[in-house]
Amino acid sequence: MQKYLKLSLLLSLFLAIFSFAFAATYHIGDGIGSQRFPFGHFYDYERSASLYTASEIGAVGSIEKIGWDCEFPGTVPVPYKIYVGTTTETELPLQTFTALIQNMELVHEGSHTFSSTGWNIFELTNPFEYLGGNLIVAVQIDFTSYSSSELFHYTDGHTNKHMYWQADIDPSDTVGYRDGDRPNLLLELGTLGGDPQLTVDTTVINFANAVFGATMGYQNINLSNSGGGTLTIEAENVSFAGSDQFSYDTTVFPIVLGSAETLPIPVAITGTVEGTATGTITISYDGVDHEVALSANVLPEGLVIIGDDSYNRNMPISPYHEYSYVQTLYKADELMHIDRRIDKIAYHWNGESTGANCNQWTVYMGHTTKEAFTSETDWIALDDLTQVFYGRVELSATDQWAELAMQTRFVYNGQDNLVIAVREAEPGYESSSSFFYSTDSSEGRSLRYLHDDNVPNPATPPAGYPVSAYPNIKFFFVEDTPKFSVSPKSTRLTNVLPNATSATKNITITNIEGGQLGITAITINGDDEFTLGNLPTLPVSIGENQSISFDVIFSATSVGEYSATVTITDDQNSRDEHNVTLTGTCFDAATLGILAIGLVAFALGSAGGVLFAKFINWFSPHNKINPLIGSAGVSAFPMAARVSTRLALEADPTNVLLMHAMGANVAGQIGSIIAGGIIMALFS
C-alpha cells in the first residue's frame, strides 16, 4: 500500500512540475497611466470589461492565472467575480453588463486585498481553454459602502476596447461607457489535453492600403496546437493561389508545435501593380484545409495613406477653437519612401461646414528620432523644422481630402521619423461637429495646444497636451529630380583686333535642386572663331547645389561680327538640351582710330563749351551763363542735354536746365552738320 502511495505522490509531483514547466506567461500592455478599473469601488456597483486581440496574445492554451498591475495599493478586501470569453468582434459592442457576460464563463470569484504594488495574480478556480479569437475579460465588483479605490496601470489608445458600468443602490442596467484606456493584463497559459489539434488564429488578412514599390511589414498567420501531443506542419502542407504580390516566409518550416504552443507564418505584400490584390493561403492538416484570405489595395505610385479611423481629436487643427498649434509624428515604417520629395499632403475633412473660420494655416516639416511626445513641453524646436506651406486651405461643406501643395521643397530621408507641425491663426471658430478625422495610437504621437485667445508662437510654443492619436493623412511623394541651371544664358565676348585673343568667359552649370543631374555632352556650333576650353570629363554627374564650369574663347583673324551657340545636353527626359548664345566683334586698327578720334572730339567739345561759357562770364559778371549749357553744345542729342541737367540738379535741385541745355544741344547738332558738309566739300 505504501508502495502505491509513494508512486501516486511521485506521479502527482511529476504532473505538477510538468504543468509548471510548460506554463507560459504573457503580458499585454505596458502603459503607465493609472485608473481604478478593473477593481474600482468608488460606486456601490462597478463592472468593467476589456478586449485583447488574438494577435496581441499570440498563443493558445489553458488560462490558469490572470493578473493586473497595481500602482496604488489599498487596505480593504474587495469582493469580485472574474468572467472570461472570446469573440470575433474587434471592439466591445455597446451593451449591458448582464448581456455581455451571458456567453462568458465565471472563472474565479472571491475577495482580495490589494496590499502591494505590482502584479496581483489570481489563480483561476475554473481554468479557461483559450483556443484563439479575441479575448474578453470582465470583472464584477459589488462593494456596497464607499471607499477610495486602488489604482491599476493601463495603456491608452485601444479605442472601444474598454467598457465600464457604475451605479449606486442598484447595479447598472444600461449600456456601458467605452474608452481606449485598457488595463494592462497578465495571462498564464498552461498545456491542453487530448489529441493534437491545429488552430489557425485568423481566416482573413487585409493589408488595406499597400504602398506601391514597398514591402509591407509582415503580418502573421499564427498556428497553434490547441490539443495535446505534438503536430508538425511541413512546407508541402501550405499552398498559395492568387496575386504574386503576396509572399510568405518559407524558412519557418517545418513548424513543430507542442501542446498550447504557437508559431507564426509571416505574410507580406510587395506592391507592384496598382489596384486590388487578392490571394489565399491554405494550411492542410489531418484532412482539414484552413484557408486564410489575403487582400490589399495597392495605392498609386508615390501615394501613402496613414490612418483610417474617424475620431475627432482636434488635429491637425481644431476648428472649434480660434487658434491651435499641433505637432504630429509619422513613423519611417509607415512612410516607406527614401530620399523622395513630398509634393503635397492632404487631411480628411468631415464636411460639416465650409471651414471659413479655420483655414489660415502655416505648416512645417522636419526629421526627428523622437518616437513619442512625453510631456507638455516636449515640442520639436522651430529651428529643426522647415516651413513648407503658408496660406488658406480650401475647405467645403462636403466630406473631402483637403490638399496642401508644398510651397518649399522638402525631401524625406526615409531613415528618421517625420514631424509635421500645423499652426492655425484664423480668428473665429466653427461648431464642434466640424473636424478632421484622426486615428488613435498606443503612444503620444501628437502634441496639441488649443486656445481661444492666445495665438501660439511656434518659436516659443506654450505648454501643450500629449495625445495618443494622429490625424489621418495622405502623402504624395515624387522623385526628387534635379533642376538644370546655366549662367550666363548669353554672353558677348570682348571686342578684339584681328589675330588677338579675347578674355576668357566662364560658363557655369548648376543643379539647383535634388537628385543627380547628368551632363552627357557640351558642344559648340557656329563660327569657328569660338572655341571651348577647360571642359570637364563627360559624362559628369552634378549633385544637389553643385556646379561645374568651362570656358568660351573668342579669336578672329578678320574684321566682322561673329556668333555661335553652345549646346549642353543633360540626361533628363523632359528637358534634354540647353543653349548658350555667344556673340563677338572684331575691329581693325583704323576703326579703333576713328573711335578714338570721336572720343577725343566729344571730350574737347564738352570741355570747350564749359571753358567758353566761363570766358564769356568774365565780360558779363552780372548776367552769367551756366557753364553746363556750354557742355551740352555737342552733337550727342539728347544725352548731352540730359547729362548737363542731371549735374545741375545735383548741385541745386531748383536749377532745371533741361530746356536751355536742349537749345545748346540742337545747336551742336546743326554745327556738326555744317562742319561735316565743309569737310566733305573740301576733301571729296
Image (cartoon, rainbow, N blue to C red):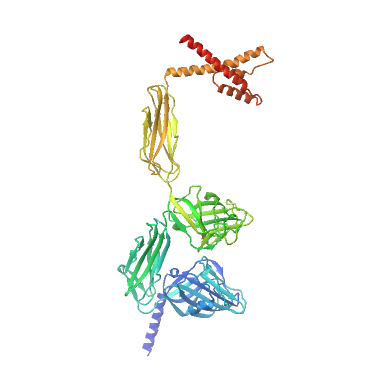
Q: Is residue 378 left or right of residue 255?
A: right
Q: Residue furthest right?
A: 622
Residue 444 visible in the picture: no
Please tell me which residue is depicted at 34% across the width and 69% down the height of the picture: 282
Q: How many marks?
A: 0
Which corner quadrant of the image does residue 241 belong to? bottom left
Q: Is residue 591 above or below residue 536?
A: above
Q: Position of residue 451 (x, y in %)?
A: 62, 57
Please tell me which residue is depicted at 53% across the width and 15% down the height of the picture: 672
Depth check, front residue: 446 or 605: 605
Q: Position of residue 254 (x, y in %)?
A: 32, 68
Q: Is residue 536 left or right of residue 400?
A: left
Q: Position of residue 109 (x, y in %)?
A: 52, 80
In which quadrant of the rendered image does the N terminus lie?
A: bottom left
Q: Residue furthest left?
A: 236
Depth check, front residue: 599 or 534: 599
Q: Is residue 338 above or below residue 68?
A: above
